[in-house]
């Protein structure tokens, strides 16, 4: 076949020369680069999934429940259980589910963004927000953060007033930095977005179960333009399942129906997710272990002299490195894969099992001794020598 590349095809202008999203999938002993949950699903849950999928398989000649009613009812119950007293009002009409929260975000941008419209995010943040914006023809605006990676709320308010975006993304806890956004900051941005447009504010809570604080679900009450996006990929340890969901005013749920493909969520996916939800308590037990491990990583990295961003997620951002890629490579050479998210000077490590985290800490311990790599260590050595 003659050699034809993407750019030889009549692809949309904005896709020319671009690369697809994706972290390197390298075959190394310790992979701590994609914020997965390191614990395989427990045997009892695997059995339950098999049972539920076997039952669903009997009906695969039919299309699945297009509205995923049972699943949305169970997800609503999970949200009510975990959001505390203030969240007791969430029903299936407030919840929508899709293939991973990426698809939820895509449906939101197809509904509320699109050609001639814009979305804003405060970067560095989850890079798929900008990529999904591009894929849906939505203009992207990169909003500001402080040097410590907290959102510069004042500058953000100004940016919202100036650009009047149709969609505002707030990721809390933020990826790749790990820090959570205080509720007051989200409320300020929501009010700014309503005054400017009004626009839809999407709070991406993919990692919220790992947070020291509470979910922002209670803020939904009385705020019909607020959407909270969640996933079973992280806390439920089910990244391979592809199940994301949102909670919002029922009108938002009705609106995304306008763009969702019919029968987008397969009967197998729905059956598997329902089985996982039956084992919520066990799975959230792993989350507690991971939170402890995350806190250990933060403390030990700081003990080694690294700068570490406060983390409410299942990963930790650490640095700072003169040569980030060289540091990433040196850690990889020791069999540990972490993530270079392109934030200059910083790398991100996902909390793994205690043994995986030990291997990572061992790798960065040797690195910390190399004054050519860790910038803050260089500073400390200079101070020491002065
Ligand atoms: C902030 C954030 N949102 C959403 C996602 C997408 O998750 P999924 O599509 O697996 O639900 C991720 C995945 O890493 C993420 O980091």
Image: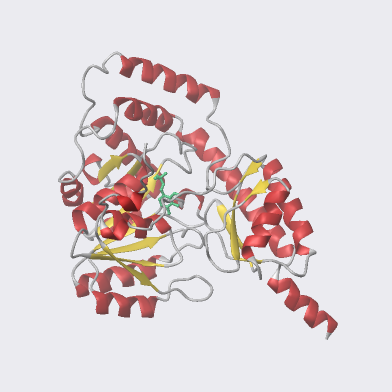
| Furthest residue toward right | 385
Left or right? Give the position of 167 relative to 298.
left
How is the protein colored in the picture? secondary structure
Q: Where 148 falls versus 28 (above or below)?
A: below
Q: Residue at x 44, y 55 (%)?
A: 214
Give the answer, above or below, for where 306 lies relative to 364.
below
Left or right: residue 256 compared with residue 173? left
Q: Position of residue 243 (x, y in %)?
A: 37, 38
As drawn, the residue found furthest toward the front would be 2
Furthest toward the bottom, the residue is 386
Q: Nearer the viewer, residue 39 or 5?
A: 5
Which quadrant of the view contains residue 386? bottom right
Q: Residue at x 71, y 50 (%)?
A: 333
Q: Nearer the viewer, residue 41 or 209?
A: 41
Quarter containing the N terminus: top left
| Foreground of the two, 4 or 26 | 4
The location of residue 328, given as percent across then percent down, is 64, 57
Q: Can you give x and y, in whole percent of width and height, for residue 48 in the image?
A: 44, 21
Give the residue drawn at x 78%, y 82%: 383
- At x 55%, y 50%, the residue is 314
Residue 154 percent coordinates (x, y): 37, 80
Of residues 228 and 347, the one nearer the viewer is: 347
Residue extending farthest top: 58
- What is the tally of numbered marks visible in this picture? 0
């Amino acid at each position: 076949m003659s050699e034809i590349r993407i750019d030889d095809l009549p692809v949309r202008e904005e896709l020319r020369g671009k690369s697809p999203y994706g972290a390197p999938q390298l075959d190394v002993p310790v992979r701590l680069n994609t914020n997965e949950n390191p614990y395989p699903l427990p045997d009892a849950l695997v059995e339950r999934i098999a049972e539920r999928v076997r039952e669903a398989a009997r009906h695969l000649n039919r299309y699945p429940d297009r509205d995923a009613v049972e699943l949305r009812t169970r997800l609503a119950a999970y949200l009510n259980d975990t959001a505390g007293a203030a969240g007791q009002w969430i029903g299936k009409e407030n919840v929508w589910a899709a293939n991973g929260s990426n698809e939820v975000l895509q449906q939101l941008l197809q509904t509320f963004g699109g050609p001639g419209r814009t979305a804003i995010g405060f970067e560095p943040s989850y890079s798929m927000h900008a990529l999904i914006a591009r894929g849906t023809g939505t203009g992207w605006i990169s909003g500001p953060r402080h040097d410590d990676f907290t959102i510069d709320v004042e500058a953000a308010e100004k940016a919202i007033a100036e650009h009047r975006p149709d969609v505002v993304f707030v990721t809390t806890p933020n990826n790749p930095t790990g820090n959570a956004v205080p509720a007051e900051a989200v409320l300020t941005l929501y009010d700014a977005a309503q005054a400017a447009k009004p626009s839809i504010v999407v709070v991406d809570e993919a990692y919220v179960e790992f947070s020291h604080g509470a979910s922002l679900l209670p803020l939904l009450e009385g705020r019909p333009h607020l959407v909270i996006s969640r996933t079973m990929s992280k806390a439920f340890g089910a990244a391979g399942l592809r199940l994301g969901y949102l909670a919002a005013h029922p009108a938002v749920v009705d609106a995304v129906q306008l763009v969702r493909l019919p029968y987008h969520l397969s009967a197998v996916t729905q059956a598997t997710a329902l089985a996982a939800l039956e084992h919520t308590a066990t799975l959230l037990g792993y989350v507690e272990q991971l939170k402890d491990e995350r806190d250990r990583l933060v403390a030990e990295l700081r003990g080694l002299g690294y700068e570490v961003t406060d983390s409410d997620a299942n990963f930790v951002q650490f640095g700072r490195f003169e040569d980030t890629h060289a540091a990433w490579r040196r850690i990889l050479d020791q069999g540990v894969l972490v993530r270079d998210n392109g934030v200059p000077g910083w790398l991100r490590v996902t909390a793994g099992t205690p043994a995986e985290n030990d291997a990572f800490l061992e790798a960065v311990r040797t690195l910390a001794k190399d004054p050519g790599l860790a910038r803050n260590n260089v500073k400390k050595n200079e101070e020491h020598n002065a």
